[in-house]
Image (cartoon, grey):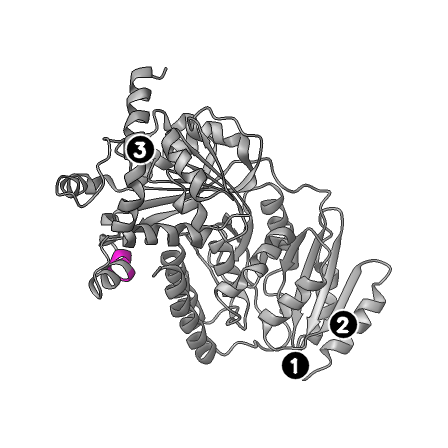
């Protein structure tokens, strides 16, 4: 039960600092700008955003929501926020029992979780404002910095704050799990919280991401999602996009071996740049099976597998979108495993991994295996999520989430001719829950690979360094 005296003293304290808060935000502009950048990376403009512990509203307003709601238990803070940002709704209320009938895409708790009387009760109360795609973003101070922060307060370099709970990522993860949230990603930011030229960029863009040093960052953050009712079921339809270049001998097998899934499965061939009769074979097979299967086909205007996949997805009518490589080295018979993973709610972006089961002889050369393992380690570090195999061509996403990914593709740009990194980077930025499904990788029975190990390997490495600047080195 809450202590009414504690509540009163807390409200009185935050009311007393309300009129000086804006001055402190300007004084510590570098820190506050980095916090805004952290949240803006995850929450794109035009989202429905709820902020708990909104203060005078600066962070929430900076995210430019289509609808924003700020909750704070200091009436003075809310009065100032409402005056400064009339386009946003603000309510003076307690985080653990406020009532608001509405769903949000993002719920933000920035630097205030440690002041809650009951953190678990706050998370429980927020469930009513979540839909299956809602992301909860929480940032809080690393408790190892507590003595230094108190020193800064005593020197007048930081606004004084009441003592708060000592939290670390493990504590917060445990509380979220107890309240039926699952953590999608977590990490740290800001090894040097003052904006000194050269020094701040070195520490915060480079050193802060190194092993061991990353445990010393000032800011910890967690992105979580509510454990929800599975978003799909057997009534949802599937589109399987098959990019095909010089794969004439595999086309009919792809149709015969692709299972029917959900309420119906359409197969979409996209052909481009073949020197054999691949497109003629696609037309022949589509005509042969027109009374048994729904088969669409097109020639791509651009080049590369990534362009072919985007073309196929634009043609798709299914609720769930799948990619199947036309070389059939990932057996089409494995696709129901991917359907089960996404339809059961186990994941929102399903990535195949070929590096669990023993590889069939000659299916992957030693240098390719080494490259795959290198890129897996690179992505695990880069995206703060575990990856076993980034280059498996079989990937699955809902049509709804793909539409959002495509809408925000400009953040990274159209730089990936293969499409694998484009999808993985986009899914990670959206904080989709990424899970991997093991598949048995088989040797080709027709044709030769379209991948050049060295030229394409160098291109993939350059894409990683580009993404590093856009994701890790915020």
- Please give the label number shown on residue 114: 3
> Is residue 295 toward the left or the right of residue 70 in the image?
right
Residue 447 % position (x, y): 63, 77
Residue 464 % position (x, y): 41, 67
Question: What secondary structure is the stretch in magenta mostly built from?
Answer: helix
User: Which element is circle 3 on?
Assistant: helix
Q: Is residue 355 above or below residue 70?
A: below
Crowding near the residue tagged with mark 1, few <14, some 14–19, many ≥20 C-alpha atoms within 10 Å: some
Which label sits in the foreground, 2 or 1?
Answer: 1
Residue to which mark 1 is pinned: 273
Residue span colored magenta: 205-210
User: Which element is circle 2 on?
Assistant: helix
At horizontal 36% and vertical 25% (from top left) the residue drawn is: 118
Q: In which quadrant of the rendered view does residue 314 lie?
A: bottom right
At horizontal 63% and vertical 62% (from top left) the residue drawn is: 324
- Please give the label number shown on residue 407: none
- Looking at the image, tell me whether mark 3 or mark 1 is earlier in sequence order: 3
- Looking at the image, tell me whether mark 2 or mark 1 is earlier in sequence order: 1
- Looking at the image, tell me whether mark 3 or mark 2 is earlier in sequence order: 3
Q: Nearer the viewer, residue 25 or 361?
A: 25
Crowding near the residue tagged with mark 2, few <14, some 14–19, many ≥20 C-alpha atoms within 10 Å: many
Residue to which mark 2 is pinned: 282
Which label sits in the foreground, 3 or 1?
Answer: 3
């Amino acid at each position: 039960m809450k202590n009414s005296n504690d509540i009163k003293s807390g409200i009185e304290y935050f009311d007393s600092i309300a009129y000086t808060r804006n001055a402190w935000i300007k004084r510590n502009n570098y820190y506050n700008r980095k916090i805004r950048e952290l949240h803006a990376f995850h929450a794109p403009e035009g989202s429905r955003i709820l902020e708990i512990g909104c203060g005078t509203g600066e962070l929430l307003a900076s995210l430019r929501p289509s609808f924003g709601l700020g909750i704070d238990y200091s009436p003075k803070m809310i009065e100032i926020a409402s005056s400064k940002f009339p386009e946003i709704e603000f309510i003076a209320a307690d985080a653990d029992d406020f009532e608001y009938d509405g769903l949000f895409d993002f719920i933000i708790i920035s630097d205030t979780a440690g002041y809650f009387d009951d953190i678990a009760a706050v998370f429980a109360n927020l469930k009513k404002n979540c839909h299956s795609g809602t992301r909860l973003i929480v940032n809080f101070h690393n408790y190892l910095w507590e003595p230094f922060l108190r020193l800064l307060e005593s020197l007048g370099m930081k606004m004084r704050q009441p003592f708060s709970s000592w939290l670390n990522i493990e504590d917060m993860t445990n509380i979220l799990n107890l309240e039926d949230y699952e953590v999608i990603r977590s990490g740290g930011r800001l090894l040097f919280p003052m904006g000194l030229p050269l020094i701040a960029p070195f520490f915060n863009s480079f050193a802060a991401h190194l092993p061991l040093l990353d445990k010393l960052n000032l800011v910890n953050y967690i992105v979580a999602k509510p454990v929800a009712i599975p978003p799909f079921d057997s009534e949802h339809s599937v589109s399987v996009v098959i990019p095909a270049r010089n794969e004439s001998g595999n086309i009919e097998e792809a149709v015969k071996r692709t299972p029917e899934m959900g309420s119906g499965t359409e197969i979409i061939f996209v052909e481009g740049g073949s020197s054999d009769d691949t497109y003629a074979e696609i037309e022949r097979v589509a005509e042969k099976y027109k009374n048994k299967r729904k088969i669409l086909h097109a020639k791509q205007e651009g080049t590369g597998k990534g362009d072919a996949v985007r073309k196929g997805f634009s043609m798709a009518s299914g609720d769930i979108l799948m990619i199947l490589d036309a070389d059939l080295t990932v057996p089409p018979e494995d696709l129901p495993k991917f359907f089960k993973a996404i339809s059961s709610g186990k994941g929102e972006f399903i990535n195949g991994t070929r590096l669990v089961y023993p590889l069939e002889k000659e299916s992957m050369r030693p240098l390719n295996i080494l490259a795959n393992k290198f890129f897996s380690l690179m992505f695990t570090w880069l995206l703060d999520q575990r990856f076993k195999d980034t280059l498996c061509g079989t990937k699955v996403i809902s049509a709804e989430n793909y539409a959002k990914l495509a809408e925000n593709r400009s953040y990274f740009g159209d730089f990936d001719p293969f499409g694998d990194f484009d999808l993985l980077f986009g899914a990670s930025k959206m904080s989709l829950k990424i899970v991997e499904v093991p598949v048995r990788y088989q040797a080709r029975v027709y044709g030769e690979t379209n991948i050049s190990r060295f030229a394409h390997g160098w291109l993939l490495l350059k894409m990683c360094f580009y993404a590093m600047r856009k994701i890790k080195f915020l």
